[in-house]
Image: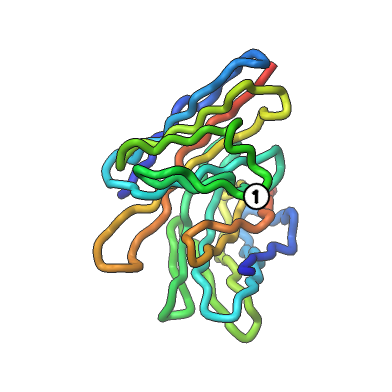
Amino acid sequence: AQSVTQPDIHITVSEGASLELRCNYSYGATPYLFWYVQSPGQGLQLLLKYFSGDTLVQGIKGFEAEFKRSQSSFNLRKPSVHWSDAAEYFCATHTGGFKTIFGAGTRLFVKA
Amino acid sequence: GAVVSQHPSWVICKSGTSVKIECRSLDFQATTMFWYRQFPKQSLMLMATSNEGSKATYEQGVEKDKFLINHASLTLSTLTVTSAHPEDSSFYICSARDTLPGGFNYGYTFGSGTRLTVV
């Protein structure tokens, strides 16, 4: 079954530092992959998505992600983190039935 | 862009009562909507898939008689938590699949969620 794994429960970075959030997927074919951000008590906002084509995907808010088939990864990156980026980040995929399967999430803390 | 409106944002109800949560697609038609549940500090778990004009499909372990889903129009799906109990307290989020023409060029849009507290 398709799934995604986020190995880091939480990450702390300093404001202005670079960020990389890890996501590994499990699927034989090319998966559909997404990154969402959730602020406390809020819904989800789509940051970016990958379906096919260019493996480096640009998203909103300065985020990007790179699909690496050889590593079964779809890591999210940002060159310089802002305090407002502190939130929960979910990697997700979906099944042929278009059900979204979420990873466990990674909580990002940003220190001044 | 596509917008999904979810109401109410939060609700407190007494144990044994029922609560209805609405999920509306404001600027697109959504033939399929999804309902998720999220416990504190946990990920989202899919509860059911709501299809316009037909019965919802529930995930394993989700009580369909407790979580009633109605998708009567292309812009509205409702989740009713019947005879709510404190263990039903959770964050419920809906999402809608934007039915754009041309195949696989769509996105999922999520509502802002509903915090349900049963006392």
* Letter of the chain that mark 1 sits on in the rendering: B
Q: Where is residue B72 shown, x and y percent of the image? A: 34, 36
Asked whether the viewer can see residue B111, the reply is yes
Q: Dot 1: what SS? A: loop
Asked whether the viewer can see residue A84, the reply is no
Which residue is painted at 52% across and 43% down in the image? B35
Task: State which quadrant residue B85 falls in.
Answer: top right
Which residue is painted at 65% across and 16% down in the image? B16
The residue under label 1 is B60
Vertical placement of residue B104 versus B20, above or below = below
User: Is B61 positioned to the left or the right of A90 in the image?
Assistant: right
Q: Quadrant of the C terminus of chain B?
A: top right
Task: State which quadrant residue B4 falls in.
Answer: top left
Q: Could you say which is closer to the camera, residue A101 or residue B55? A: B55
Task: State which quadrant residue B78 falls in.
Answer: top left
Vertical placement of residue A94 versus A15, above or below = below
Vertical placement of residue A9 versus B58, above or below = below
Residue type highlighted by circle 1? Gln
Q: Where is residue B29 shown, x and y percent of the image? A: 28, 46
Q: Could you say which is closer to the camera, residue B5 or residue B50? A: B50
User: Is A50 positioned to the left or the right of A22 in the image?
Assistant: left
